[in-house]
Image (cartoon, coloured by chain):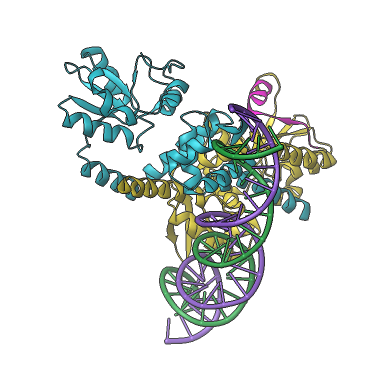
Chain colours: A yellow, B cyan, C purple, D green
Amino acid sequence: MNADRAFKDAIYEQIARVSRAVAHPRRLELLDLLCQGPATVESLTQKSGMPLRSTSQHLQQLKDAHLVQVEPRGAARIYRLTDAATCDLFRQLRGLAERYYADMQAITEAFLREHDALETVDTTALQARIDHENVVLLDVRPVEEYAAGHWPGAVSLPFDALTNRLAELPRDRTVVAYCRGPYCVLALHAVEILKEHGFRVVRLADGVPDWRAQGLPVAEGGNST
Amino acid sequence: MNADRAFKDAIYEQIARVSRAVAHPRRLELLDLLCQGPATVESLTQKSGMPLRSTSQHLQQLKDAHLVQVEPRGAARIYRLTDAATCDLFRQLRGLAERYYADMQAITEAFLREHDALETVDTTALQARIDHENVVLLDVRPVEEYAAGHWPGAVSLPFDALTNRLAELPRDRTVVAYCRGPYCVLALHAVEILKEHGFRVVRLADGVPDWRAQGLPVAEGGNST
DNA sequence: CCATTATTCTACGGAATTATGGAATATCAA
DNA sequence: TTGATATTCCATAATTCCGTAGAATAATGG
């Protein structure tokens, strides 16, 4: 029947609204950043390195698909994920790419090798380590992302300020640095820098969205410990 | 740093391979059908009503993205989902569309109203009903989909054969008809037909992929009870 | 009210995707 | 080997999507 076809077309078209919205690398990057917390167009532009107008246009598309919401703050506008399900979608897509594409692992491994950073901890290894050893957890993301959610007890020391504030870090404890997630390079570079300065330091690959998804506690607010 | 940018671009490009593959209504329809079990190009063509070459091309793209796998059987080729995660992706996209778009609900409700089929049961309601009442569960999908997975104890009576085999159904018990899922029209039409012939009948909206995702038991093989 | 800041709107050329149909390939049955 | 069946390959035109930049809008501070 023809009405059946029209119905199915309409339904799959609606589902495709979601998938089309995430079918572009830049929009995936924006979602990834928004998983860390709300942000303005400008800050997303700066974090992603894409042209301002592109950021705005892609955010527009995410908004049209209802994946993100806008709210004005003065002349600026704060974009935020509609809800945690949006972040889950991003994480699932990322997981499938990891699972299905050997390229994904190859790219990552090559990059980590270049930076002598193959040694990473995951969340379960970290928790074991916290119990046995007196490590200090270091959050190297920008302060507003730390405020939006961080590992309880982690110290905030944004990457940009790292070299100026090395004195704040203990030399007698192992430092565990994390940033936005497994493909964020901030913690990677932080580890490089800290190693050069003689700190004992490892990278934690997971990030806040992963802990939230696992039901682990996430602290909010505050600027540092 | 430039190497960082190249790394991020490569990573997001890999993730986008997944999302681009599902960013088209026809491919979503194919995935939806493949969630019911393996199928040939021809059977998918017939079930979806799209041109044969289109079916093949879209399956090609799903294969390139590793979402589906092919295996020859004689001159034909059997396509199947790579694993359950692919089906989960489809279900999540569908769930987000339901959650975010009022259109999705409006379209569905209008269609159900047209067919006087607003009365549906969900899985939990069904289980309660099975305990209290002696209902008969009717699977109206094609036999090969029934064989690939069905509600334990459900009777297979494909929609195409329904009018010829009405005698097989009991008139003293309520019939609960299901098909591929909430947006499949087979059970809907089956309910219409059965009502016309004086059966007591309701539609079950969920389908096998939903039960699998909920961890409910799913029986395989066999052609009927 | 004017300048500034932050962002969106609009338009357009170019790139990527899609639909379509003819030709080609591969398997099977006789 | 031939014909039938099932599917893919290829080429082309139509469509959609993307990046870019100038103009427009909207809020804020003087």
Residue B75 lies, in percent from the top left, at 61, 33
Q: Is residue B84 magenta?
A: no
Instruction: Give the quarter of the figure containing the N terminus of chain B.
Output: bottom right
Give the residue drawn at x 60%, y 36%.
Answer: A96
Residue A155 lies, in percent from the top left, at 64, 38
Q: Does residue A48 sit above or below B105 in this rendering?
A: below
Toward the viewer: B200 or B53? Answer: B53
Q: Is residue A126 magenta?
A: yes
Residue B152 lies, in percent from the top left, at 38, 15
* Residue A136 visible: yes
* Residue A153 visible: no
Toward the viewer: A127 or B73? Answer: B73
Q: Is residue A223 left or right of residue A112?
A: left
Within the image, what quadrant is residue B126 found in?
A: top left
Instruction: Give the quarter of the figure containing the C terminus of chain B.
Output: top left
Q: Does residue A86 sit above or below B197 in this rendering?
A: below
Within the image, what quadrant is residue B158 found in?
A: top left
Q: Is residue C29 left or right of residue A78?
A: right
Within the image, what quadrant is residue B109 found in?
A: top left
Give the residue drawn at x 49%, y 54%.
Answer: A62
Give the residue drawn at x 60%, y 50%.
Answer: A29
Q: Is residue B52 left or right of residue A71?
A: right
The segment highlighted magenta reads: A117-129
